[in-house]
Amino acid sequence: MTETLPSEITLSARGSCPFDPPPEVTEQAKARPITPIRFPDGHIGQLITNYTLARAVLADPRFSARQELRHIPIPNRLADGEMGPADPGMFIRMDPPQHTRYRRLLTGQFTVRHMNLLVPRIERITAEHLDAMAEQGPPADLVKAFALPIPSLVICELLGVPYSDREVFQQHTSTMLRLDSTSQEVYGAIGKVNEYLDGLVEAKKASPAEDLLSGLITGGELNQEELVTIGFLLLVAGHETTANMLGLGSFALLSNPAQLAALRADPTLVDGAVEELLRYLSIIQIGIQRTALEDVDLDGHHFKKGDGVLISVPAANRDPERFEHPEQLNITRPNTGHLAFGHGVHQCLGQQLARIEMRVGYRALFERFPDLRLAIPADEVPMRSDMAIYGVHRLPVMWEEVRQ
Amino acid sequence: MKVTVDRERCCSSGMCALTAPKLFDQDDEDGRVVLLIAEPPEELHAAARKAESFCPCQVITVSDD
């Protein structure tokens, strides 16, 4: 029986439509809300593909995010032994109250109001990048010209990381997110970024500035190791995720001309378009992992203490019980709540920043280049099936007209 | 309609302030929910319910009376 269980490898193997979840996941989702799954270490856990159950598990404190309880869902990342508890500051792999203490030091910086204040600056950064793209002329790689640099620059400014050092973290982040990287390569890459941040934090201690890292330093609540780890989390999460949404979202809109036309005709639809793209694309393709701390019965499903639970965000966000015609991109769909940012106490800290970057980004891109189109056939766009965060590796685009 | 919030369990996602800004704000210190109107007028009832359903930590409770 266990021979036929799906394994995590297939969780990133896409079918003919690059925007749809992997066919194997969709198949499981159609058959049942929850499926036994084999983790690379041999552990038999559970794969959740149903929206309601996914949301219930993510909101339930009986399911833990603690690092030492995890079964690594990526085959090449099997550590040599058991994983220890999360390093100090790595709060995404902790439960309350440890998690709460760290998170509350940061949440004041990511409020809706605080993020709204950044709109003019993000608009300016976006305009500058689109200017440069227009200046250089077609064709352009939208990832290099637009999707990656804008969120990278924004998070650098917010944290107080010199943007000129971006090569250090962009290259190593890429290694960390490649599904075929070995544990050794991943830890090596993490080490390099941490080494860089260690120096940066030391420098900021000597001369603090008006930025988030300096604020955390002068707050005096965190030691050097915690400051480096939190800086690492914010830096990596802050640029890769939004960058991939900008790239893949642009591809999705260019591939759905009626949706793009509707957005161009009425740019105020952009808020809804962002939520719909988040749902439709669900770039956290492997899913979110939790471990049952005790035997749990939830919505008629039984979880044993110690069960590794993998929540497929792409499948849950395409659940037909929750979303009508979930396979369709519909930017005017009423927003009923998607799980792209997760759910529960770990829901994405930077989600309000991501929303603003996407609203500003998509709107400016399609206003500036009214006839923007793909420069290569859609089926030749290199997709990030090989990465923990889905998206496009490159997106070559063409245009004739540029608006000021 | 009566709205209550549990600030102790709030995880500062900002979903309430995003969804129903007339009803909810966030603390500048740590982003936790600040309830602006405990008994919202009829035109804000739908927004209140939406904020209740979106809250990732289920700290918003809306009751009819």
Image (cartoon, coloured by chain):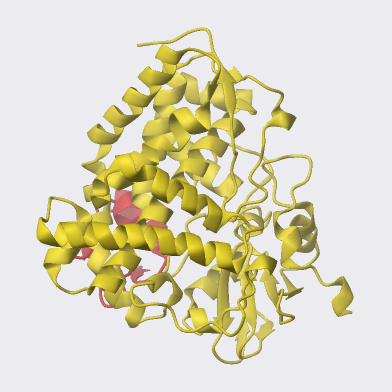
Chain colours: A yellow, B red
In the displayed structure, A95 sits above or below A364; it is below
Determine if residue A305 is in view.
yes
Which residue is located at x 23 percent, y 68 percent? A105
Residue B59, x across and y down, in percent: 34, 72
Residue A386, x across and y down, in percent: 66, 51
Which residue is located at x 41 percent, y 80 percent? A95
In the displayed structure, A164 sits above or below A200; it is above
Residue A21, x across and y down, in percent: 70, 51
Which residue is located at x 57 percent, y 81 percent? A291
Classify the position of the C terminus of chain B by image quarter.
Answer: bottom left
Q: Nearer the viewer, residue A170 or A62?
A: A170
Instruction: State left or right for residue A349 relative to residue A62.
Output: left
In the displayed structure, A29 sits above or below A92; it is above
The number of discs equals: 0
Which residue is located at x 72 percent, y 66 percent? A8
Instruction: State left or right for residue A359 relative to residue A142.
Output: left
Instruction: State left or right for residue A282 relative to residue A195.
Output: right
Q: Nearer the viewer, residue A304 or A267?
A: A304
Residue B10, x across and y down, in percent: 31, 71
Q: Quadrant of residue A27?
A: bottom right
In the displayed structure, A8 sits above or below A334; it is below
Q: Nearer the viewer, residue A120 or A203?
A: A203
Q: Nearer the viewer, residue A337 or A279?
A: A279
Determine if residue B39 is in view.
no
